[in-house]
Image: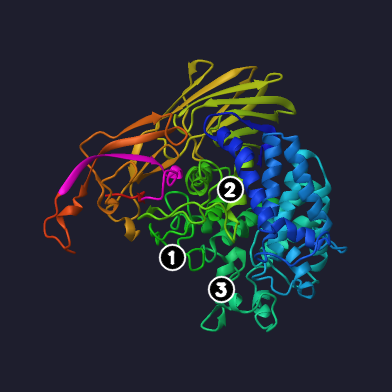
């Protein structure tokens, strides 16, 4: 199975289309300016000898520029802009001029430690930065047809392939990401060496002796030993879980270590399993997926701990201290998408959708210029989005996700089509021996579960159209050309319609979208006795701007009263609110006492908003889980 590429998909609705417009008009220009003012782009100019000066910022800052170029490339496809394209070309020219004669490209090592290439792969992100360069080169070529950055990427990939692999230097990325990037590069160029190198990086990992353990023996590591020892040793001994280098991928069954690294590794491993048919990798990914389901926030966030920016143990999902990095939710989307392509099951898209609408989307403000690094599920106030970070991985990551959203909506095999996400717009595909087909979705999803799909082949064509039935939907109706169609979702979670399709055939799908209270597993200690609200793909939360009586730790719904959903077109860009009646402990009962024997309850109207929209009206209190 393969995705329908972003170049063949147009989004036109009132939820995602405005966000893509904001991404183009606000987010990417804002991030470009940040990359300029923080010296990230000038680092390439300095490495190219175009200007003088020292390297600025953190050693992996190149990756932020590469991700921004990738995001901007997608945007040129969705929102063509000649002026912006010229500006992007200038950035690409600067990157290209910084490439060394042998193909190497990394401004930190070129400017600061040119004699220490590849000596600290565990922490210094050389291969990680290279991977983001490869992804940018592929995206720019696909969006514009221009090859300059793709050629730069290939020259660097050739150097890496000549350096690492069987019979060459031992080496693995400490921060994964190059694996899935090499797969993209292989697919767009047809160069088999890149796929083989990706397979090497995936399958060599976790074997002993580890390249990372060997690097710890070097007292003169670039960047120093401190961070390396902190993350890769325990009680003075090497321990590889931080970077998922503790076991070969085929033997891994537990999500451990740094969450973003893990997500990128599992995404790359799924690509390799699809390309090679490696059953051992597929079985391991199944086990890892079962495990992540015990370590997954209701919002699609992963990685509860700030200590390692990652995983701890099953069911440990604190609310106030949740790390749940924006990049980790984006990485989960990458992995879930590839698991769907590998296995064709909607359960992976269910998680993708949850992370997309909640855990990732909360990472950016509605105006497109503020960003969360962490995404807690409760706050006592004081949290706010930032215009940028010293470690700025999240802002360009969310920008590239929004720009490339089209690639997650549809998929196809040799004979069949899948609709995974219900997003208004169109897609152009080939079916049934090269019959050109246009698919059109009209929907107000996620506010409504009603979707109208127009199937318009050039000539009549027989194929199966598979419509995802989300796990939150227990009832649905479907009509074809105005007539009721009796069908049940298959075990893979899809409603399959196998027929000969004619011009302007219509499918009308109505997914019931009730408000539901959901409960966490009893082992999730922070949420014992609590529930959360969701409607459709959206998780809801309570902010004190809507609920001024506060006391969110004691907020509870009155169960015998109605809970209703209503759309407010003026609030937060237009959202569906959930309103009901609740109670809180009356804080005035305590006065200056710490304890009270019989606190009274205050009854009040309560309002919940989609989680992604919190903290857009001030930095007050918030809670997802209530009693």
- The answer to whether residue 186 is above or below residue 199 is above
- The answer to whether residue 192 is above or below residue 616 is below
**Residue 42, percent from left and from top:** 74, 58
Nearer to us: label 3 or label 1:
3
In the displayed structure, does residue 67 sit left or right of residue 541? right
Q: Residue at x 63, y 33 (%)?
A: 416
Mark 2 or mark 3: whose residue is earlier in sequence = 3
Q: Residue at x 80, y 57 (%)?
A: 193
* Disc 1, SS: loop
Picture disc at residue 313: 1
Which residue is tagged 3?
Answer: 231
The alpha-carbon separation of the residues under discs 3 and 1 comes to 17 Å
Quadrant where the N terminus lies? top right
**What's drawn in magenta, residue-wise?**
601-620
Picture disc at residue 398: 2
The single residue placed furthest to the left in the displayed view is: 598
**Residue 526, percent from left and from top:** 33, 59
Nearer to us: label 1 or label 2:
2
Identify which residue, 285 or 62, lies in the foreground: 62
* Disc 2, SS: helix
């Amino acid at each position: 199975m393969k995705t329908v590429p972003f170049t063949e998909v147009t989004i036109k609705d009132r939820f995602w289309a405005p966000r893509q417009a904001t991404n183009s008009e606000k987010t990417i220009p804002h991030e470009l300016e940040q990359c300029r003012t923080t010296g990230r782009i000038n680092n390439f100019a300095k490495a190219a000898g175009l200007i003088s000066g020292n390297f600025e910022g953190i050693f992996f800052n190149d990756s932020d520029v590469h991700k921004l170029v990738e995001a901007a490339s997608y945007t040129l496809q969705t929102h063509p802009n000649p002026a912006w394209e010229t500006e992007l070309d200038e950035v690409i020219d600067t990157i290209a001029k910084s490439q060394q004669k042998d193909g190497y490209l990394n401004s930190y090592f070129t400017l600061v430690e040119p004699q220490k290439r590849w000596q600290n792969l565990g922490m210094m992100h050389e291969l990680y930065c290279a991977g983001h360069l490869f992804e940018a080169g592929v995206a720019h070529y696909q969006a514009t047809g221009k090859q300059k950055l793709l050629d730069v990427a290939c020259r660097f990939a050739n150097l890496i392939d000549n350096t690492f692999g069987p019979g060459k230097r031992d080496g693995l990325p400490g921060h994964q990401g190059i694996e899935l990037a090499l797969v993209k590069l292989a697919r767009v160029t047809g160069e088999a060496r890149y796929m083989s190198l990706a397979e090497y990086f995936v399958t060599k990992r976790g074997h002993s002796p580890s390249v990372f353990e060997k690097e710890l023996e070097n007292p003169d590591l670039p960047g120093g030993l401190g961070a390396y020892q902190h993350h890769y040793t325990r009680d003075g001994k090497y321990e590889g879980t931080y970077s998922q280098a503790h076991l070969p991928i085929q033997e891994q069954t537990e999500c451990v270590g740094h969450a973003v690294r893990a997500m990128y590794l599992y995404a790359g491993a799924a690509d390799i399993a699809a390309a090679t048919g490696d059953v051992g990798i597929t079985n391991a990914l199944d086990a890892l997926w079962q495990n992540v389901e015990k370590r997954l926030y209701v919002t699609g966030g992963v990685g509860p701990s700030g200590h390692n920016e990652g995983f701890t143990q099953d069911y440990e999902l604190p609310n106030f201290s949740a790390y749940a990095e924006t990049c980790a939710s984006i990485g989960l989307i990458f992995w879930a998408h590839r698991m769907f392509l590998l296995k064709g099951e909607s359960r992976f898209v269910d998680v993708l959708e949850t992370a997309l609408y909640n855990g990732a989307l909360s990472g950016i403000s509605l105006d497109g210029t503020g960003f969360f690094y962490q995404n807690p599920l409760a706050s006592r106030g004081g949290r706010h989005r930032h215009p940028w970070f010293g470690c700025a991985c999240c802002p360009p990551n969310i920008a590239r996700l929004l720009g490339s959203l089209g690639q997650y909506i549809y998929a196809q095999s040799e004979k069949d089509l899948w609709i995974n996400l219900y997003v208004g717009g169109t897609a152009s595909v080939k079916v049934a021996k090269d019959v050109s087909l246009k698919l059109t979705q009209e929907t107000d999803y996620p506010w409504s579960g009603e979707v109208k799909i127009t199937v318009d082949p050039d000539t009549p064509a027989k194929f199966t159209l598979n419509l995802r039935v989300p796990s939150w939907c227990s009832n649905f109706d479907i009509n074809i050309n105005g007539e009721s169609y009796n069908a049940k979702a298959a075990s893979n979670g899809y409603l399959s319609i196998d027929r000969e399709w004619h011009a302007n055939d219509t499918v009308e799908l109505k997914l019931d979208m009730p408000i539901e209270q959901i409960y966490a597993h009893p082992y999730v200690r922070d949420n014992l006795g609590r529930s959360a609200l969701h409607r459709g793909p959206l998780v809801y939360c309570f902010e004190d701007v809507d609920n001024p009586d506060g006391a969110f730790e004691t907020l509870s719904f009155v169960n015998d009263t109605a809970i209703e959903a209503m759309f407010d077109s003026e609030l937060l860009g237009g959202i569906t609110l959930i309103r009901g009646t609740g109670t809180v402990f009356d804080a005035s009962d305590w006065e200056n006492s710490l304890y009270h024997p019989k606190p009274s309850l205050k009854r009040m109207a309560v309002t919940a908003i989609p989680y992604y929209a919190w903290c857009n009206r001030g930095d007050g209190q918030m809670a997802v889980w209530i009693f």
